[in-house]
Image: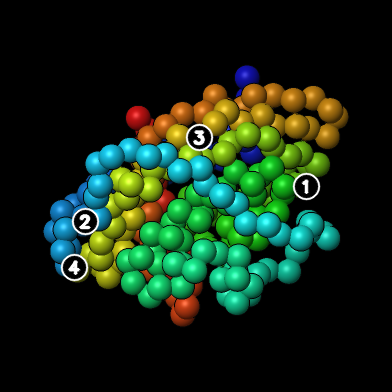
Amino acid sequence: MKTNAAIRSRPRFWSAATALGATALVAVGLASLAGCTGGNPIVTETPSPTAAASATLSPSPSPSPTPLTDAELLALMPPEAAYPDVRGAIATAEFFCAQYGPAFQSGDSRIIAALSDERCQFCAEALSTAAQEVAAGEFESGGEVVYDSTQVRANVHTGDGFTYVDFPFVQSPTTIHRADGSTDVTDPGGSGRIYFRMALDGEVWRVIGAEVQSA
């Protein structure tokens, strides 16, 4: 049973969708993918799950480490993330997924913070919970994300100018390790489809919003 309020508030990938402002991203994302420019959404049908690889950061010296610069962030990301088109948005969305579990495992959420736009409610909730766990001397294990890179859909919406990216995923169970040595399986894991709203900010794609539709 979940006894920690911070855990209950963490936006899990498999959980009920998190609203994006006044409009749910599931509805907006699907509509935008059907009626946007640049040709048809990128869709392939043969499933081939990809294990999300995480970047390696040096140990954080304090609970409030120095934020990553854009140059430092890009150096940790795949080369495709630097493309100023839909390819960069896709690579960044996939990279964000890869960093989600490790951020809670290590307590170092600098990458998630650097990828997150201030308008992203999903991101803000995740970062707040990660900070609370660090302050309490807690960390997590598990929670890794495996996504299907062959079923990515992405395109630019003509109305709002954002780039929408979505793909199916599976997330493993998550265990929290508390300062007193106790542990608890806080989430059994699950699967679904994650929807991202992305925007290019200088040389870096940022997550404007994210929402999950559980399977």
Structural distance between the alpha carbons of marks 3 and 2: 25 Å
Q: Residues within 10 Å of mark 1 (few under 14, many from 20)?
A: few
Any mark on residue 171, and which? 3
- Is 124 situated left or right of 5 in this image? left
Structural distance between the alpha carbons of marks 4 and 1: 46 Å
Q: Residues within 10 Å of mark 4 (few under 14, many from 20)?
A: few
Q: Residues within 10 Å of mark 2 (few under 14, many from 20)?
A: some
At label 2, which amino acid type do we have? Pro
Q: What residue does disc 2 label?
A: 41
Instruction: Please give the name of the residue rendered at 61% of the width and 60% of the height, measured from the top-left corner.
Output: 111
For marks 3 and 4, the one nearer the N-term is 4
**Tags 2 and 1 touching, CB below 8 Å:** no
Structural distance between the alpha carbons of marks 4 and 2: 8 Å
Q: What residue does disc 1 label?
A: 135
**Tags 4 and 2 touching, CB below 8 Å:** no
Structural distance between the alpha carbons of marks 3 and 4: 31 Å
Instruction: Please give the name of the residue rendered at 63% of the width and 19% of the height, measured from the top-left corner.
Output: 1
